[in-house]
Amino acid sequence: MRLIAPAMANKKKTVNKSAWVRSQPLSLSAKEVLDKAKKEGIQMTVAQVYTARSTGKKHALGASGSDSSGKLPATHASSDEAAFRRLVLNVGLVKAKEMLDAMKRDVGL
């Protein structure tokens, strides 16, 4: 008598990469997210990290374009403020704070 293994035994566990990226702290830079993914055996590109984070923000706001508080999303801020927010997301909150602290020291604040 021959035992047949269940079909699931041969399938690899798949990961929803977008959900996995969105589960990572925003304080991690895209490169840090990629490094962490690699350690966990998940293959992805930096573009996938940026896309997942961008899509996650759109879904968080919903179709109305505002969050549950009724406030306008950050994308309606001035272009300088929007650029600053993108920079913070790209380099990570911790690194951005370090950069701001260094700028404050440089100008004597």
Image: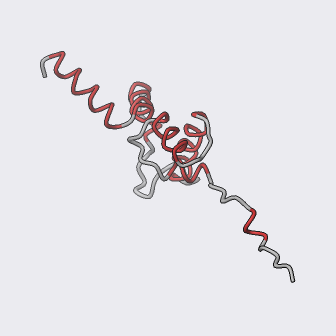
Residue displayed at 49% across by 35% down:
30
* The residue positioned farthest toward the left in the image shown: 108
Q: Is residue 108 above or below residue 20?
A: above
Residue displayed at 55% across by 47% down:
58
Task: State how the image is colored.
Answer: secondary structure
* The residue positioned farthest toward the right in the image shown: 1
The quadrant in which the N terminus is found is bottom right
Which of 95/89 is in front?
Answer: 95
Q: Which of the 4 image quadrants contains residue 46?
A: top right
Using residue 81 as the reference point, say whether residue 106 is left or right of it.
Answer: left
Where residue 11 sits in the image (x, y, percent)? 73, 61
Residue displayed at 41% across by 49% down:
71
Q: Is residue 94 above or below residue 22?
A: above
Residue displayed at 44% across by 58% down:
68
Using residue 100 as the reference point, say whether residue 51 is left or right of it.
Answer: right
Where residue 91 sits in the image (x, y, percent)? 41, 31
* The residue positioned farthest toward the top in the image shown: 107
Which of 59/98 is in front?
Answer: 98
* The residue positioned farthest toward the front in the image shown: 1
Which of 68/31 is in front?
Answer: 31
Where residue 4 sits in the image (x, y, percent)? 82, 76
Q: How many marks?
A: 0
Where residue 62 sits in the image (x, y, percent)? 55, 54
The quadrant in which the C terminus is found is top left
